[in-house]
Amino acid sequence: MRKSYVFLALFFSGLAGFAGELRIITSGGLQGVANDQGQVVVPAIYEKLGWSNGQSDITSESIGYFENGKWGLINIKTTKLTNARYTTLEPFNDLLFEAGIAGKFTNIIFRGLIDSKSQVHLDFKYYTIDDLGDHRLLVSEYVTGGELRFGVYTDQNERLIAPEYASIDREGNYILARNKARKARIYNLNGQVVLPVWVDEVKPTSEGLVVINEGYQGFLDHHGKLIHELTYKSVEDLVKFPRWEVKKLNGAEQRFFLCDSLSYDYETDLLIAHVNNAEHMLGASETLFQDQQHGLKYISNGFLVTRNKYLQTWGIYKTDGREVAIGFDSVAVDADYFYAKSGASWDVYNLFGRKINDRPFQQVRSSQERHVPVRKNDYWGWVDFQGEQLINYHFEDVIPTTNPGHFMAKNYGRWGVSGFDDEWLIMPQYDSVYAYQSFYLAERGFATHVYSLGGKLLYELPYTLMPGDFLAVQDSASVGAVTDQGYYIYPEYDEVSRHGEFFELRKGTITGLISGTGRVLLGPKDAVEDVLSYSEGYFHIIKDGKHGFVDENGKLRIANRYDSAQYYHEGLAPVKLLGKWGFVDPAENLVIQPFYRYSSVFDHGLAVIQSGEHFGIINQEGEEVIAPVWKYIERLTTGNYRITDWDMKMGLVDANGKFIVRPNYGSIEDTDQALIIAGRSGKKGVLDYSGFTKVPFDYQQIQIVGDYLLLRK
């Protein structure tokens, strides 16, 4: 049990009148000690001499003796130092001996330390004793459940650290005591706490210790002085975290965090601070977990699912930090339930945090219509939202579908589709079955049977089916499709693509167009080369190298006379004629003449145009709402427009073409909260739509999420 003790060699050069090498001798079945001249030092009167670990080295002029099933200690002058009363006895270091006594009601051996004068230096109550150096001893005790707890004593029986830790190590002038979660408390060699907090990790360096707690780093020198507080991103490079300020938009609250970034979950009003590889989950006003060892895995329906990074266990919590259930090997989530695994068993929790099953299941799958597929006694069945049996356990396997009332099931090695009334919709006679949009695809051998969701057999196809944006049919190098309406397009085309409910069929240089029911809009005689898009009832096509539009009946409504075009939006489509862009309506009236180098489609009655090198905004009458004098104009997702002048200054224009703020800023970011994050002289601030400064230009980074302002200096 010793980590370091010094054996004296069996060679003594001047030992109290004896000289030469000592050796154990046996006479009449008993043992003693003699020197190399044969002179008896210890008479052969003992059953065995040496130590309980099988060694026979003499330490501190002493050696163990075995008598009547127990060990005692004598010196080489034959003086009995102790009676033979120890279950184990062996040298601990060059001055002390570890002795063990068996418990009265257990087989556990309780160990202590004695010296060569039989004085007790450490009481007999420890399972292990190890030498930490500098007269410090690492001891362990058994606790309830058979676990060991470690502490530190001196070799004079003085307690420095109580035996209550899962492990203890020494690192230079420090003692690191860890709990079950592997978090460490740092002590000096006198047993005094050096840091008031537990830490996740300790990295020794030539100058001291780098300490890491919840993603933050600090530094301790060799003398126990905290040189750098635990606020650094990298203490070795002295890189600090940005300082974030969090405010409510109404100004009612203000908090500060040191972190890389902050993110926000709109559903739960939860802020998450990202600190190196740690995540700190922040509620409306406080940190949810005092000990940030929880890695966030899911946020769902007012609950958090986290994984403990040290215990490697999963837990379910409310978003205010209240514990629902913890200690699982894993947790899966769907829209209605949490599925918690422990060993080979599963439990199901509903969205109220209540476990719906009395006994665990062997396996579970995602719910369907609030019903849960579960495996029990090696067979699958279904339970309802209260955990009551819905369908008896008799399937070999089940798979949920999006088809109400039905699920895929395996019975006697074959797949089919069953209902929650326990009646077969598609008999179990297939190698595999899977659901795709409005079909069931059942495979048997090299054929695929296509069924409607009502269970009607539509087609038996000897081809490869490729579900994607639509159900494609592949035959060697040719493709076809089965439309959502169940119409079969034979695989004879080079390419099939989809435009809404219509299908473009390309073969060679000719493109056809049919509806989902098989109605032909464009055929080979129409000689259309390409269909580019579909919008507001019109297909943008290319014919004879020119752009035009056909309607949903395949009628050419806008002649293929244009160099280029875009899709219809708000009743107008941009077209390019003689190198310039204008707009036509569905009757091919040239509503806005082709004056422009570029034009966007209309959105909320406005379009961005480019005249020469300059950008502007026009309305549907072709009137200039914003004169084309700007370097660039960009429509934003808020419906407003960001304008950049020739000095690279930015401003904001509303959907009516009115300036919200003039172009006086280096950057402009519009938000859904009617606030503008603007940049000026390398710093950012916040303006309202009246142009008033709501947050001064003092920050490097600003985010507006939910009801929060996130500000980084």
Image (tube, rainbow, N blue to C red):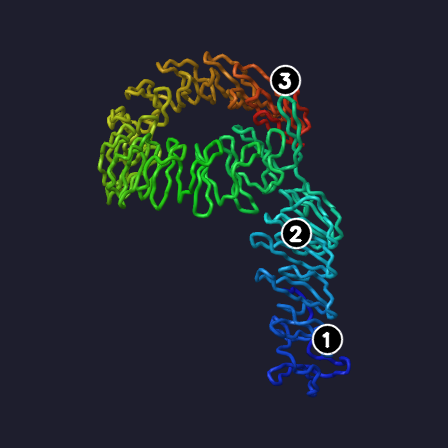
Q: Upstream in the sequence, badge 2 or badge 1?
A: 1
Identify which amino acid the numbered label 1 is placed on. Answer: Glu
* Spatial CA span between label 2 and label 3: 58 Å
The image quadrant where one finds the N terminus is bottom right
* Residue found 63% across the figure and 38% down from its top: 290
Q: Which residue is mark 2?
A: 177
Residue 691, numbered label: 3
Q: Residues within 10 Å of mark 1 (few under 14, many from 20)?
A: some
In the image, 484 versus 86, the foreground residue is: 86
* Spatial CA span between label 1 and label 3: 92 Å
- SS of the residue at dot 1? loop
Q: Which residue is mark 1?
A: 61
Residue 297, numbered label: none
| CB within 8 Å, label 1 to label 3 | no
Q: Upstream in the sequence, badge 2 or badge 3?
A: 2
Residue 43's place in the image compared with 274, above or below, is below
Identify which amino acid the numbered label 3 is placed on. Answer: Gly
Asked where in the image residue 470 lies, by quadrant, the reply is top left
In the image, 97 versus 684, the foreground residue is: 97
The image quadrant where one finds the C terminus is top right
- How many numbered markers are drawn? 3
Q: Position of residue 650 (x, y in %)?
A: 60, 23
In the image, 363 versus 498, the foreground residue is: 363
